[in-house]
Every structure is written in structure tokens, then in C-alpha cells.
Image (cartoon, grey):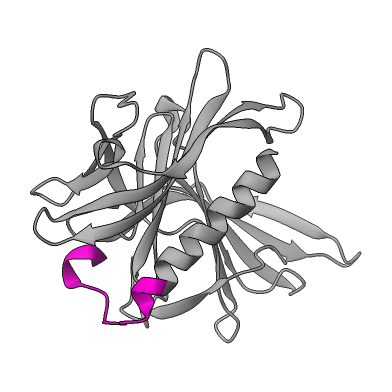
Amino acid sequence: MKKIISILLAAMMLALFACAAADAVPQSEGGKKFESDWAMSDGLVQIYYEEEGYRVAVDLRDPETGGGSLWEYACFYHEDTDSLVSVTSMRTDYTVNPDTGDQVFGDSVYEDFDDENQATEFTITEDGCYLIWNNGRENPGAELQFVDIGRFEGVWRNEDEEVEVEFRWNGSDPDYFFYTVYIQRGKSDADTYASFLMNGSYDPITKRLSADGTCTLFTKNASGEYDTSDDGESYDAFFSKTEDGKLYYETANGIELEYDLLGGD
């Protein structure tokens, strides 16, 4: 039954966005600021613009049980309140497989269109740094605040420059509220290439991610295997997004990287 309801809800959401798209207008400037990833300890909000509306996913983990809950919303931007307001809501609780770390979802707690008094609202603080979640059905966190962490997760590449960068968000642990950043300069089958392991943090005011860490040099020896060396130095790296969605890596000549949908090698 859960699968059938999910399919029906997905169809309703698509129809809702399709109706709005019939009178297609450009995305409002006011709504663009919501498109990002937002985080708090044990929590992550991801907001994507699709057609005329926004899909919002809120993932909250319970550190005591190791499980958590996922809320999914279809929202529209309301210019008069400068907020995203939901028209459909779904909540599903999950446990985490201790061996694989995978989420194991149960049945939906609810999955339906929102009545007027059930609508969930997302707003952004005046400084632009925090997203406020006001859950109209439960309000489990009494308007929790999530800081803007940008949208970097995944693998970015520039084949011509032989550069690959991978970002992993570690915010499920309050002691590791940062991105792990892996940078590779040179191809992994080259005679020599460099690999950087860094911690990165995003500044929502400057829209810039700063990372620092160490470098390991891989050098192929006479046997065709790689010897490694670490010079013990600390290195910095800086990243930002371009208007066309690419990743700008601040180097001497500046390098633009494109997102790899498949990730990995």
C-alpha cells in the first residue's frame, strides 16, 4: 500500500507543478536564495527548484537511536511573505543499518496534500545565513535553524587540467561539522600525481568555501608501483560557484570544474 500511495502522491506533485508551468514565468529572484544545502548538527535540508516549485527534503537524525526521519515537501515561493510554503507533505521514519550505514525506511507517517493549517513554511534570516523550518503538521523542532553550507557535495572534474575535487559533508556529527575535501592534481595512472586531504568550511556571506590540509605525492617506481611522500606542509584551497553552476577552483590561473553526475572514476 505504501508504494501505491507514494506513486499517487508523486503523480499529484508532478501534476501540481505542471499546472503552474502552463503559465511559465522565470524563476522569481526572491526564491533563488533558497536553492542550497542547509545544515545543523544531525540535520540537513536540501532545496531544489523544479518547474515552478521547490522540492524540499529535511533529514534529521536521532543521535540516541541512530535512526531518524525524512520530511519531503512540494513548495511554492510566496513573495508577500518571502517564504517557501508547502502544498504537499510526507514524513518517513528510518533506522540505520549498523553494518552498511544505509537508511532503512519504514511506512510513511503521513503523505498527503496540506490543509491551510498544515502548511509548512521555510524562511531565511535577514543576514541570509540561516534557514528557518516551521513544520505545520508537527513543529518538532520549534522552528529549527539550519546554516547555509552551499551545494558542493559530490565529484567535480576538469579533464584538460587533470584536476578532480570531491566534497563530502560530515555534519551528522557535531564534532565534524565541515566538508572533507579530496583534491587530485594529475591522473591516477601518471608517473607522478598529488593528492590533497582537507577540511573545508563555507562562508554564506562571501559564498566561498575555504579548505586546508596536507598533500601526499605519489611517484611511480621502477616496479610500476607508487611510492608516497608527505612534505609535512599545510596547504589552502578556495572554491566558489559560477553563475552557470560550475565550480571555480582558485589557483594561479583559475580552474573551472564541472559536476560529475556519476561520480567516482
Q: Which of 69 and 19 is in front in this view?
A: 19
Q: Which residue is drawn at 18% across and 72% down?
A: 29
Determine if residue 73 is in view: yes
Work out which residue is located at the far front of the displayed protein and give it.
115
Q: Which residue is drawn at 58% across and 23% down?
A: 67
On screen, residue 182 above or below 118: below
For the C terminus, which image quadrant?
bottom right
**For residue 154, side relative to residue 244 (left or right):** right
Work out which residue is located at the far right of the displayed protein and give it.
223
Q: Does the magenta stretch include residue 78?
A: no
Provide residue 122's location: percent of width, then percent of height.
Answer: 25, 46
Q: Residue at x 51, y 30 (%)?
A: 69
Provide residue 103's location: percent of width, then percent of height.
Answer: 65, 34
Determine if residue 236 is in view: no
**For residue 164, side relative to residue 78 (left or right):** right
Which span of residues is magenta-colored? 19-33
Q: Which of 215 and 184 is in front in this view?
A: 184
**Which quadrant of the structure image shows residue 98?**
top right
On screen, residue 4 above or below 144: below
Provide residue 233's location: percent of width, then percent of height.
Answer: 45, 50
On screen, residue 54 above or below 212: below
The number of numbered discs placed on residues in the rendered structure image is: 0
On screen, residue 17 above or below 226: below
Q: Which residue is drawn at 50% across and 18% down?
A: 63
**For residue 257, side relative to residue 108 (left or right):** left
**Which quadrant of the structure image shows residue 105?**
top right
For the N terminus, which image quadrant?
top right
